[in-house]
Amino acid sequence: MGKALFLLSFVFFFFLSANSQSDSCSTTLLFTPPLQFNTTSLNCQSVWSSESFLLRYAQASPGLWSFVLSAPDTSSWFGIGFSSNGRMSGTSAVIGWPTGNGAGVIKQYYLGGYSQKAVQPDQGNLALVNPTFVSKGSTLYLAFQLKVGTPQSGLIYAVGPKNAIPASDGLLDPHRTYTSTSFSFSTGQGSPVSPGGHEGSGDDESTSRTKNTVVSGASSAFLTTKATHGLLNVAAWAVILPLGIMAARYFKHLDPTWFYAHLSLQMTGLGLAIAGVLTGISLENEFGLEVDKHKLLGFVALGLACAQATALLIRPDKKSKIRRYWNWYHHWVGRIALVIGVVNIFYGIKVGRESKSWNGYVGTVLAVSGMLSIILEIRKCLKK
């Protein structure tokens, strides 16, 4: 009897330990039910040792690749993103998480930015085939195929907070940590990527944690910089610069006060616009945001505003024959710059995927400015 109990205990603990051991490249993948594609010939690489991420992959046929990403079960989401440049923004990713009793969810996401709402479930540019989530012992697996000639070499791995399963809407909590690598599918070799000075290998635990506090999904530094960028530009293009135009158009009877008011307001607005552009550049360099059209419009508006400022240096005398041409230039370049600046504010709200309340706030500011301008215009007409 004693030997039988010892044998049963040995078998029990053997299977318990076998069931709880972590995955390794020497492990044969045996799933019940089996996956919808062959896994026997997959290559295997340890892609993130600090988080025990393994990536199995192979080209199943021309234009079709098979993948199995495994990670320890920490009751959180985990996934892999395919990027052209190693940056999170603009990346399409495959992400999954357990839901209990061996079941789980696997979805494609589009990483449009760093806020929670910018990470969109069931969106992305991957031609995803046969996505399957498997929970086996203490290891989770994301198995899927991609219809692609050669997968993008920038691979981003991330894992969410422990014991934080996403809700039914699929919105993800900020990642606990991540790593970005450049991976060669021909050689199976990967190297850390550090675009814009903020992404890097998570194998260095201290580096990974430090960087994560800077760029995690709802990072305070990112959100603060983003909000500052928006507020500076709203103050410049929707408040200060319009007031400067009004000072010149409606208060010339208060000479020379109107001129100094106009000059002070426009210089202040220009300073705010420059600061707004600089914070935008910071968002691109530090956090990897890529909004080329928004950036181009910002540079055009700022360039025209700077041209306005430098025009003061070549302003002809009032009695000069070319003064009226200078006036035309000064008036219309300023108006065009203002229109582009205001349009770019709304475009920035759109590409930044901000809430509709931002449109309401800016619209209210512009409405007040417009009403004030109309009142002053009527008053000016009545005095003629």
Image (cartoon, rainbow, N blue to C red):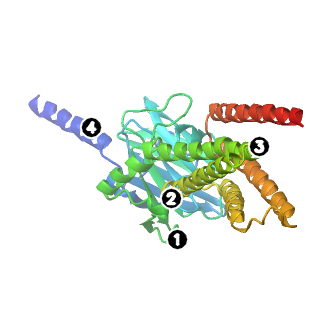
Residue lying at 69% horizontally and 31% vertically, measured from the top left: 364
Q: Up-down: is 371 above or below 35?
A: above
Quarter of the image with the C terminus is: top right
Residue lying at 53% horizontally and 42% vertically, measured from the top left: 227
Mark nearest the camera among 4 and 2 is 2
The residues bearing labels 3 and 4 have C-alpha atoms spaced at a distance of 90 Å
- Percent of width and height locating residue 35: 54, 45
- Of the residues shown, which amino acid type is indicated by label 4? Leu
- According to the picture, the residue beneath numbered tag 3 turns out to be 253
Q: Are marks 1 and 2 in contact (CB under 8 Å)?
A: no
Mark nearest the camera among 4 and 1 is 1
Helix, strand or loop at label 2? It is: strand
Q: Earlier in the sequence, mark 4 or mark 1?
A: 4
Q: Are marks 4 and 2 in contact (CB under 8 Å)?
A: no
Q: Up-down: is 346 above or below 27?
A: above
Q: Are marks 4 and 1 in contact (CB under 8 Å)?
A: no
Q: Earlier in the sequence, mark 3 or mark 4?
A: 4
- According to the picture, the residue beneath numbered tag 2 turns out to be 155
Q: Residue furthest left?
A: 2
